[in-house]
Image (cartoon, grey):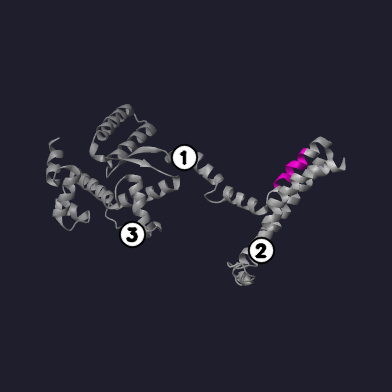
Amino acid sequence: MRNRLSLFTVPYVVWMALLVVAPVIMVVIYAFTSNAGSFTLDNFSDMGAYVSIFSRSFQLAIVATLVCLLIGYPVAYAMAKEGPGFQRIAMVLIMLPMWVNFLLRTYSWMAILENNGLLNQFFSDNLSERADYKKDYLDFNLLGEDTIPQLTQELIRAFTVKRIGYQFDVYSSLLRLFAALENPDIYKAAHISLRNSQELLTAEQVKKLIETHHGAIQRTNLAEALNYSCEHISRIIKTNTGYTLKAYCQKVQMAEAARLLRTTELPVCQIAASMGYENRTQFYKVFRREYGLTPLEYRRHIAEE
């Protein structure tokens, strides 16, 4: 009987030898040997640089011990009150994690709990408001158009205040809103494939800064404002809009210029200067490429409609 029971311990002994004892022996060997395989103590010469890490490790060990005591005693008491069947199952469940080497357990927890780990990735991808942004989609943005937000505010105000005859205000605002939405010049559409919500957030921050400055902002200023490298800013814009940073800034500039041409009587030279173009010929060239008309032709075309 005793020999039969001894046979049942063989798998456990082999498992412990491979996954617990062997890794510890390898750590000890690597600690006292050089790359050439000779004995050395040089690996311990920089231990002073890791004092803060050791200190934090001891603190975490103390906290973990206290937590284990708080959990372990109630569990042990509950096991003592139960029958042998429950005790055997509970003991297996408690001992099972101990069969795996502590380094493997540590790296497993790191993969689960780190900033980009499985748990955080699950919550950010599935429970956040930006979960859908991981999918491919067509992104339609309004460029330099103030009419849409104004009409939306009028609709909200009409529904909130509900003055006498407010229904007519709603109908009027809706008609003007639909008429404004029919204008193709106010849209920018780009096929976007985003890898994660953080990338989208960065892209939105970059686009908002560009649109706030009406496209007249340098790449270095964007990088400094958002604490990213210039190359990262350019890559984010290219990936998420389909345009280079320069092309996207020009589109924003021309959209703002078109709005000023439609809604103001400012001279073209003044509009070009406000967009950061000292050379009016260059401004005409970029505007014509974007809209197929020169600024003056565009203004006359809008006036004739």
Residue 155, x across and y down, in percent: 34, 34
Crowd around label 1: few <14 · some 14–19 · many ≥20 (10 Å) = some
Residue 133, x across and y down, in percent: 42, 40
Q: Is residue 50 on the magenta stretch?
A: no
Q: Which of marks 3 and 2 is in front?
A: 2
Q: What residue type is labelled 3?
A: Asn
Residue closer to the observer: 21 or 124: 21
The answer to whether any part of residue 110 appears in the image is yes
Q: Earlier in the sequence, mark 3 or mark 1?
A: 1
Kindly identify the residue that appears in the image at 59 percent across and 69 percent down.
49
Estimate the spatial distance between the alpha carbons at disc 2 and disc 1, rounded to whole Å.
47 Å
Q: Residue 47 carries which label?
A: none
Residue closer to the observer: 216 or 113: 113
Residue 266, x across and y down, in percent: 16, 50
Q: Earlier in the sequence, mark 2 or mark 1?
A: 2
Crowd around label 2: few <14 · some 14–19 · many ≥20 (10 Å) = few
Q: Mark 3 points at which residue?
A: 221
Q: In this view, does 259 lie to the left or right of 203?
A: left
What secondary structure is marked by label 2? Answer: helix
Crowd around label 3: few <14 · some 14–19 · many ≥20 (10 Å) = few
Looking at the rendering, the stretch of residues picked out in magenta corresponds to 89-97
- Dots 2 and 1: beta carbons under 8 Å? no
The image quadrant where one finds the C terminus is top left
The image quadrant where one finds the N terminus is top right
Q: Which mark is residue 131?
A: 1
Q: Name the residue under label 2.
A: 29
What secondary structure is marked by label 1? Answer: helix
Q: What residue type is labelled 2?
A: Ile
